[in-house]
Amino acid sequence: MTQESSSSSHALIPAEKRGGHSHDRGLLLIGLFKLAKAIFFFCIGVGAIHLLHKDLEDEVMRLALRLRFDPESRFVALLLDKVDLIDAHRLRQISVATFGYSALALTEGVGLLLEKVWAEYLTLLLTISFLPWELYELARRPDWFRLSLLLINLAVLWYLIWLLRRKKLLAAE
């Protein structure tokens, strides 16, 4: 039997019968989503540190020109008004908060990829704790992005509750 046909027949046998462990696709998907969030928030933190001791108004104008926005537009003017409120102390706060959230999402993601029960409970707890804030934000300024985030988190919540209950029932048998 050739190496190729051996590996393809190996793939057709369920993992449980080979003595291996079948990975939960839902946990895999949620874990990958959490890792993507960790990378995103890590990049935000790095960006905040990069902007320390720089003229933020100049940076916004450079970015607007690079993205071919009209520097006189209302959007650029709004950004400049908001950026004027951010000082070095606030940038440090943003970087610390985003690095902390990134570390938390990394912990969740790795734990879920390794199918650790503590990670399932941690993700469940964190997802529940952010729901009031997400509902508030959606009620304050409804848009498709906020609604999508809420629906994704509700799906994660539902799946984790279902999975943990299923595990509990299987353990009781």
Image: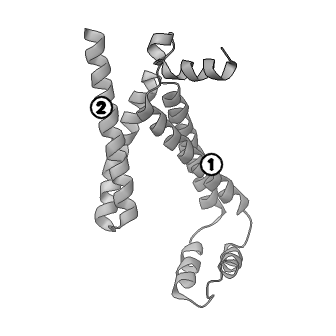
Left or right relative to 157: residue 6: right
- The residue located at (48%, 18%) in the rendering is 13
Write down the residue under mark 1. Answer: 42
Taking the image as shown, residue 63 lies to the left or right of residue 103, namely right
- Determine the image quadrant of residue 76: bottom right
Q: Secondary structure at mark 2?
A: helix
Rendered-image quadrant of the C terminus: top left
Q: Is residue 59 above or below residue 160?
A: below
Q: Please identify, in this view, whether the residue under mark 2 or under mark 1 is nearer the observer.
A: 2
Q: Mark number for residue 161? A: 2
Query: Which image quadrant for residue 118?
Result: top left
- Report crowding for label 1: few under 14, some 14 to 19, many 20 or more residues within 10 A (C-alpha): many
Amino acid under disc 2: Ile
Residue in view at x 50 percent, y 34 percent: 108
Q: Position of residue 146 (x, y in %)?
A: 37, 60
> Is disc 1 placed on a helix, strand or loop?
helix
Query: Between disc 2 and disc 1, whose residue precedes?
Result: 1
What percent of the width, then of the height, locates residue 78?
52, 81
**Mark pair 2, 1: CA separation:** 28 Å
Say above or below: 156 vs 75. above
